[in-house]
Amino acid sequence: MKISAAAAALLSLAVPTATAWTAVPTSTSIVRSSSMSIRSPSLLQSTTVKDAAVEEVAAAPDTGAREFGVVNTNKLSKLYDLVVIGGGPAGVAGAIKAAQMGRRAIVIDKPKFDAGVLPNGLDLFFGGPTGLFSKALRDLAKSTNVGALRAQEMESDVIWKQITNGIVKLAMRNSEGQCRTLARYGIDYLQGSAMLLGEDDPANAVAEKKFAKDMDSPEDGLRSVKVTHTGVLDDYVGFVDDAEVTVTGTKVLVCTGSKSTRLPGIPFEESHRIFDSDTINLLGYFPRSVTISGLGIIGIEFANIFNALGVKDVNILVRGDVETSTKKLGMDMDVANELMRLLKKSGVKVLEGTSVSEFSYVPPPGADDEYIEMKLNDGSTMQTDLFFAATGRYPVGKNEETGLESAGVEVADRGMVGIDKKTLATSSKNVYAAGDVIGPPALASTSMEQAQRAVSAMFHEGDDDVTKDANHDDPLSIGVWTIPEMGYFGLTKEQAEKEGYSVVEGTARFDQCLRGRVFAPDGLCKLVVDEKEGTVLGCHLIGKEAAEMVHYGMALVKAGTSIFEILQTVYTAVTFHELFKEAALDANSKLDFGVEWQEIFAILQSECDIDFSEDYLREKFDSIDEDGSGELDEEEMRALFESMGRTVSKRVIFNIMRLSDTDGNGTIDFGEFKAIFDKIACPKDEE
């Protein structure tokens, strides 16, 4: 069979299996292998396929043509500046950053599930975060009145088809948008399993010779990636399925993400009704009851979602206790308690100190009327229609398919790739990593920033350090898509006190603003405030739009904004942002020197060359306290200020006495007087 010159060149790089190109395409499936056995109906099988776009794709003839995830061999035979392994938020963001810097990039991604790939090659999960399914399901749970549909005697499978059809539409919109963005930047996207080759691999050695003239500094080296189970387009033979190619770039960015942790003793492979945080994305039926193991963010979100969908029996099993679990998430305890209150109010049961010791019976496929039977650690039994093990995730660094360790990349036991925290370079030359694969915080937002920072570092050609201001361990804003939402940024009271702050908390319930009273009374807004300066150290929210509002809280913390500035801010009426002023007022009421003192302090503010030591203040105080009572009245206070060279009006003296005279005897003692000057004195220079 005649093949193009570009295909022949690629074959010379794919040393081990050059004969792969002699195969004639026989199937439209891009990816064959899957590490998980899914026996439940898939997401696509559950759709009604009534949406026009879905219907058109599903009805497309089986011609072997691919619109997404395939690349022409002519392109693949040329040197890339950046090869990205992984097509999640980090991988896509890194490739776009490279294109914006004028570099040629390719994204290589293996679809998570065969069932998530449409006939035209569109991977519904491409470019989306791990939680894309849960976010889509959450929105549909809020907009779908399941109770009303059931009242019309609509069957559960029909309702679920309506819901999953909506999920597919949302997922298609996202993945198509990501593909269009890549195309707009001239970035190639290839579906397949990618393996990083070592520097001394024969295919890499061949590539170094081939591309030596294409490099400004051949001694800098390059890296090659073997791609299997892929489909490519050849000018002579057209589409070639299940092919193997080698792609080469001057740099490689590893964004292989994470997988769900599967604890021993849970029969994932034996049941179509037991899910983890990956396989839950393919849920193909409407569960009658749900049991969730784990009180992490994913477990909490799904408990809320299933409850909102009208599932009457939703249980969360917590091996330890709620307080310990929520503190591990960095959650404020008042927010956590409000979450637990709302969960229990909605009917969700949170069982502390509870775990499954044995799965007594797991229904086989087709036994739709039967339930999973479990024995709990206290000896009791429980039945459930769906068991969801939300027991955490781990980085995909040790996966043999990716070949990271054998290619010289340092990988920890749990699969976390070791990186330089500023540049995100790995221990292997010209290889960088970003996203879940490098460990916490493993959020889509931070993963994208990491990938962009890595690309900036690898391609920067100036003398300045583009990563000098980067702090890999900077605090992050967290959004939890429960119903209602949660959001938090900065320190809790406990964390602040551990760092040496003396703090107060200001709290406002959502019904303390007009919009909350009318539309969404459940929830609270809390500010953690430095007692000395009045600056906001943390913001913690639960309630409608909390995951949006937390960004304003983050801005307050990062800017070192004081509650006094918040109290002077005019917020648009009938908005949730009015809650920040209510919380600031509450915090102000707990300060020794609140907003009512600020104008007085501005008037009394000292020059920094004046010594307000305790000895100096005591000497001046005693010189006016002629009767030795240890207290001064208004006239004596005014004389005291004048003796210090500071003429103060009667009005200011009156207000100082009014605010300081806590016992109501009309005088002020030395301790109260000194506290005022401690506030207005210039800070001492740190040695």
Image (cartoon, rainbow, N blue to C red):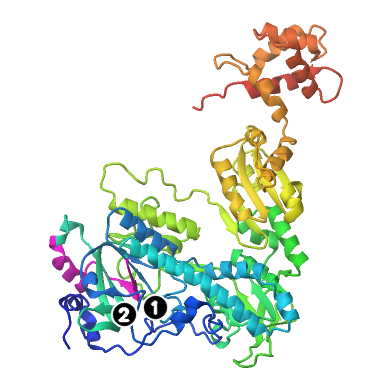
Q: Is mark 2 on a helix, strand or loop?
A: strand
Decide which of tag 2 and tag 1 comes sooner along the chain. Answer: 1
| Residue for badge 1 | 121
201 or 613, which lies in front?
A: 201
Q: Position of residue 473 (x, y in %)?
A: 48, 50
Q: Badge 2, how many Cα within 10 Å: few under 14, some, many 20+?
A: many
Mark 2 or 1: in front is 1
Q: Looking at the image, can residue 11 be seen?
A: yes
Which residue type does callout 1 highlight? Gly
Disc 2 and disc 1 in contact, CB within 8 angstroms? yes
Q: Spatial distance from mark 2 to mark 1, Cα to Cα?
A: 10 Å
Residue 212 falls inside the magenta stretch: yes
What residue lies at 73% left-to-right and 51% top-to-bottom? 516
Q: In this view, does 220 lie above or below 357?
A: above
Residue span colored magenta: 188-213
Q: In which quarter of the image is residue 96?
A: bottom left
Percent of width and height locating residue 382 = 72, 81
Indicate the quadrant where residue 356 lies: bottom right
**In the displayed structure, does residue 546 sit left or right of residue 632?**
left
Q: Relative to residue 451, is residue 43 drawn left or right?
A: right
| Residue placed under numbered mark 2 in the picture | 231
Residue at screen point 65% across, 73% down: 292
Using the image as rendered, state which of residue 475 and residue 567 is in the foreground.
567
Residue that appears at 75% across and 12% down: 650
Horizontally, residue 69 falls left or right of residue 234, namely right
- Decide if residue 346 is on the left or right side of residue 436: right
